[in-house]
Amino acid sequence: MAPMQRVVKPSRTRIKICGLTRAQDAVAAVNAGADAVGLVFYAPSPRAVDIDTARAVIAAVPPFVSVTALFVNPEPDEVQKVLDSVRIDLLQFHGDEDDDFCSQFKHPYIKAIRVRQASDVVASCMRFPGALAILLDSYKPGVPGGTGETFDWSLVPEELPKPIILAGGLTADNLETGMRTVHPYAVDVSGGVEASKGIKDHGKITEFVNEVYRVDQQSF
């Protein structure tokens, strides 16, 4: 096996605002400078949306901003229904899905893993050859994500064969440490820019995006 080489980091860290439930929050994310937004199609989540809500949110997102649909152990027809109903640019899976399952929809996909040790990250890159990127989230037993808690960022190896998206408990206050430790391709935030579950704080969104820009400017 050829030695792994770290993916070259782009000149600017990409930003995804996830867990949107309202069109006005999508507008705030876009206006602040987000590169992508995320919609949760997982009923137990307080940020879950249905097709009609998703249509309203996506209508506020211009074509040059990516839309991601998040699922947790869905049935294939559940994913396909969303793809057939609204504009989705990326799929994101947070459950026990394997690469074959994630790849069957002929859409680029992100695989989320909950980090407990460094080997989790390396193994996931190998187990999901079809993944566009690997999203790193916090581990909490029985919870597929959205815990609002960080994990030990020092567990992320320096050399990985896939782009890494850093998630899990990010806020404008801890973002610099996370970015300088992990050097992610992108950062993903949900609870860290909320006024309450599923309702975004527009000021926090702007603060978060501006902090990403600030750290990037100091790093290059």
Image (tube, rainbow, N blue to C red):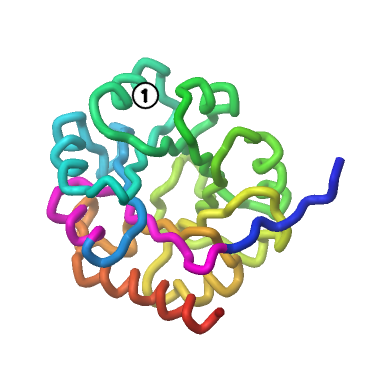
User: Where residue 172 appears, x then y in whole percent?
Assistant: 37, 73
Q: Extreme front residue here?
A: 64
Q: Name the quarter where the N terminus is drawn.
A: top right
What residue is rendered at 13% in x and 54% in y?
24
User: Where residue 14 appears, x then y in whole percent?
Assistant: 44, 60
Left or right relative to 105: residue 129: right
**Quick check: is 148 in the magenta stretch?**
no
Q: Amino acid at mark 1?
A: Val
Left or right relative to 24: residue 172: right
Left or right relative to 102: residue 32: left
Magenta range is: 10-30
Question: Which of the pair 67/208 is nearer the observer?
Answer: 67
What residue is rendered at 29% in x and 42% in y?
39
User: Where residue 140 appears, x then y in whole percent?
Assistant: 50, 48
Examine the image and state in which quarter residue 83 appears: top left
Q: Residues within 10 Å of mark 1 (few under 14, many from 20)?
A: some
Q: Extreme top residue here?
A: 77
Q: Name the quarter where the C terminus is drawn.
A: bottom right
Q: Is residue 83 above or below residue 175?
A: above
Q: Which residue is mark 1?
A: 79
Left or right relative to 112: residue 88: left
The secondary element bearing badge 1 is classed as helix
Question: Which of the pair 208/95 is nearer the observer?
Answer: 208
User: Where residue 29 appears, x then y in whole percent?
Assistant: 25, 59
What residue is rendered at 17% in x and 35% in y?
55
